[in-house]
Every structure is written in C-alpha cells, then in structure tokens.
Image: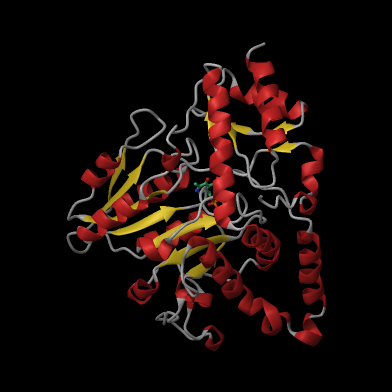
C-alpha cells in the first residue's frame, strides 16, 4: 500500500489536484525550508551563508536529483531552468567544424527544444525535426532512421508534454552511439513519476526541473552529463561559477572546473534549491517504483473510463509508451478546464492535445473517479 503523504500537501484540501505535469502542490515543509533560507541570509554577516551552506547546496541538491535520474553522484549541475540546461549543451557543439552538424529532434518536444535548435541553424546546425503523424507518438523507426554519420546529437523528450508519449531510451541511445552521436533526453515529464536509468542507458545528457512531478518550486532546473563525457565539453554559455577556481576571479581564457560544475553559469538560484528539498525528501521516502506502479494503474483506469464512453484519448494506450498524464480530447478544452476548476477539479489543456490530467501518488482513487465523473457530467451534458 502506497503512502500518499496527503497531510504534507496543504493544497490538497482545496480540491482535486491533477496538475503535476505543470506545477505540483507545495509540500508543507517548504515553508520551514524557506524560513531556514531567510535565517541563513539574515545571519550571513556573522555566519557566512555561502561558506556554511549555500555554496555546497547546488552539489547537494544535484546529487539528490541524480539519484532520481538513476545517475551517479557528481553527474548533475543545477540550472536556472531546463531551457538554459539545453542551451548550455547546445553551446558545447561547434557546428561549423568537422562533418557532424546534424541535430535530430521531434515534433512532440517542448517548444524550447525547437527554438533553441532553430537558433543554432545560424551557426551551422542542420536540424531535422522528425514529425509525429498522429500528433500523439513519433514512430521509433523514423527517429532511428534520422540518425546518421552526420548526426552530432539526438535531442528529444523522454515523455512528451503534449501527449505523454514515452520514447524507447535504450534503442535511441544504442543507435546514436553506434553512429557516433550523443543523446539528450528532456525528462521533465518523467522524473518523479517514472524510474529513470541514466547510467544504465548510457545516455549523455538529461534536462528537466523540479516544479512538476518533483513537487519543488520554480527556477530549479537541472542538467545531467554522463560523468566520463564531462571533461570533453566546454560550454560557450558559461560564467564565473563554472571556473575551476571561481574565487580567483582570473582573467580569460576560461579554465573549466574538472567537475560537473563546468556546466554552471552564474550565482545559483539559492531560494529555488531550498524549495526543492522537501519534495525530494517526500518522493524518495515514498519510493519511485511505488509511485510509477500507482501512476500506471491509475492512468489505465482513466483511459478505460474514457474509452468506455467513446471519448478521444490523445495519449498512447500502451502503458510502456506513456508517462504519467492522460490527454483527453474535448471541444473547447480551455472552457472545460474552467468549468472543472469551478467544481474544484484542477487540470489544464494544450492546443491539439485537449485536457491534460495527471494523477500523482498523493491523489486517492476516489478523487480520480470523482474527477472523471465530473468531467463526464460536463462533456456529456
Ligand atoms: C517537457 C518539458 N520540457 C521543458 C519545459 C520547460 O522547462 P523550463 O521552463 O524549465 O525551461 C517544460 C515545461 O512545461 C516541459 O514540460
């Protein structure tokens, strides 16, 4: 029996929270954590907040996130957000030199992906966007076929934000490495709801952030870099914190840190780190395997409910190909979102996907049934 820890999320008293793909509910302990942050700041002149806690905090939180990603200690550098993590990786490539200038991505990725790779076209990148014929999935064969000897990077979502489609990480890493290319997975919609296996997959980069399934606050993104790859890379998007000896304040040229800190930029987002810790504590104590099993059971229950009523499900029906959300087609989805909110059921919508509904470990089965019944009363009215 899973421990839902409901008492630790005050927001749950105000309705049925099914928004973990967007912003998770705040853990009660975040308030204490933010007070600890203010206390450290207030006493900085006598107790040096940087030396006692703040300077080490990125590394500490990074190592906690690494565990959730299935990565080794020292493999994760905190970022201001996932987009900056991605741009930092992009800045490691020299698209003009050599034979490899191709980046493979997909049409189901979060818009930052396309915006950032599109920007690299100006400096020589050849970007191939593998289409999604049905708007729900991207056929694996089409992705594999796009990876060739000119490919330097395959960059795509592990789980899509718009359909919850989950790619086969193993197969993609295997093909990319066989062709001499690297792989970046955006795991923002996977981390915290699915067990991830960064080290086993031999994946090169992961990006994401804490505000969704990890129940943390905004501005705590992260970048995982395969430990044996780190020293081969020198991001042009950088800053003083990435220097080997930042407090030397040495003139250029840049001498990158020998650790994952070489992927940092400037002053870390300290409040965001404080806000992320309680969620990580809760997730680890509930256990990712339990969370994933519960998620798969309940997304199936929701999908069965929807199919039985003849609704359109814009999420893969095969559970090995989906993440933690279920997308349901609805006429005028934004209006349905508002009507659900009036009835204390909180979901959202995306153009082309319909309603996005995400049960997490803290939701009860009764809540999910109630949410689906309220939805039925609106859709079938
Ligand atoms: C899959 C995915 N990637 C990236 C992002 C954006 O992340 P950030 O705002 O941290 O750049 C989101 C946000 O919704 C997302 O769902």
Q: Nearer the viewer, residue 1 or 303?
A: 1
Q: Extreme top residue here?
A: 381
Which of the 4 image quadrants contains residue 53? bottom right
Here the colouring is secondary structure
| Quadrant showing the C terminus | top right
Drawn side of residue 258 relative to residue 127, left or right: right
Q: Is residue 322 above or below residue 48?
A: above
Residue beneath the point at 66% across and 51% down: 2
Residue beneath the point at 77% across and 64% down: 34
**Residue 135: x percent and y percent?**
40, 30
Q: Nearer the viewer, residue 264 or 247?
A: 264
Q: Extreme front residue here?
A: 1
Residue beneath the point at 58% across and 52% down: 290
Drawn side of residue 135 relative to residue 273, left or right: left
| Residue 32 visible in the snapshot | yes
Q: Is residue 4 above or below residue 46?
A: above
| Residue 122 visible in the snapshot | no
Q: Is residue 292 above or below residue 234?
A: above
Residue beneath the point at 50% across and 74% down: 73
Q: Nearer the viewer, residue 148 or 311?
A: 311
Q: Nearer the viewer, residue 45 or 316?
A: 316
**Residue 118: x percent and y percent?**
36, 47
**Residue 178: x percent and y percent?**
21, 59
Q: How many marks?
A: 0
**Residue 296: x percent and y percent?**
53, 41
Drawn side of residue 378 relative to residue 243, left or right: right
């Amino acid at each position: 029996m899973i421990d839902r820890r409901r008492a630790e999320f005050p927001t749950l008293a105000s309705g049925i929270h099914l928004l973990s793909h967007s912003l998770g509910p705040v853990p009660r302990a975040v308030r204490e954590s933010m007070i600890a942050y203010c206390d450290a700041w207030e006493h900085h002149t006598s107790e040096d907040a940087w030396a006692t806690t703040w300077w080490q905090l990125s590394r500490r939180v990074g190592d906690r996130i690494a565990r959730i990603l299935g990565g080794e200690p020292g493999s994760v550098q905190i970022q201001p957000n996932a987009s900056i993590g991605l741009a930092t990786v992009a800045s490691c490539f020299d698209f003009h030199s050599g034979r490899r200038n191709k980046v493979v991505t997909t049409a189901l990725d979060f818009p930052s992906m396309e915006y950032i790779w599109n920007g690299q076209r100006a400096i020589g990148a050849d970007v191939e966007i593998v289409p999604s014929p049905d708007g729900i999935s991207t056929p694996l064969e089409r992705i594999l076929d796009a990876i060739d000897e000119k490919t330097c990077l395959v960059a795509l979502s592990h789980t899509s934000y718009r359909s919850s489609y989950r790619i086969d990480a193993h197969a993609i890493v295997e093909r990319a490495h066989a062709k001499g290319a690297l792989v970046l997975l955006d795991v923002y919609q996977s981390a915290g709801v699915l067990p991830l296996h960064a080290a086993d997959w031999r994946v090169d980069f992961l990006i994401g952030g804490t505000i969704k399934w990890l129940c943390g606050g905004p501005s705590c993104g992260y970048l995982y870099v395969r430990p044996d790859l780190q020293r081969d890379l020198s991001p042009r998007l950088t800053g003083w914190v990435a220097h080997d000896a930042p407090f030397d304040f040495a003139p250029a040229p840049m001498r990158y840190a020998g650790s994952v800190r070489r992927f940092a930029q400037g002053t870390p987002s300290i409040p965001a780190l404080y806000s992320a810790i309680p969620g990580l504590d809760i997730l680890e104590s509930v256990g990712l395997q339990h969370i994933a099993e519960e998620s798969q059971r309940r997304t199936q229950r929701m999908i069965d409910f929807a199919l039985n009523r003849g609704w359109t499900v814009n999420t893969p029906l095969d559970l090995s190909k989906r993440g933690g959300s279920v997308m349901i087609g609805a006429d005028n989805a934004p209006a349905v979102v508002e009507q659900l909110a009036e009835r204390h059921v909180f979901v959202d919508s995306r153009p082309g996907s319909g309603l996005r509904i995400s049960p997490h470990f803290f939701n009860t089965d009764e809540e999910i049934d109630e949410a689906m019944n309220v939805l039925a009363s609106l859709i079938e009215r």
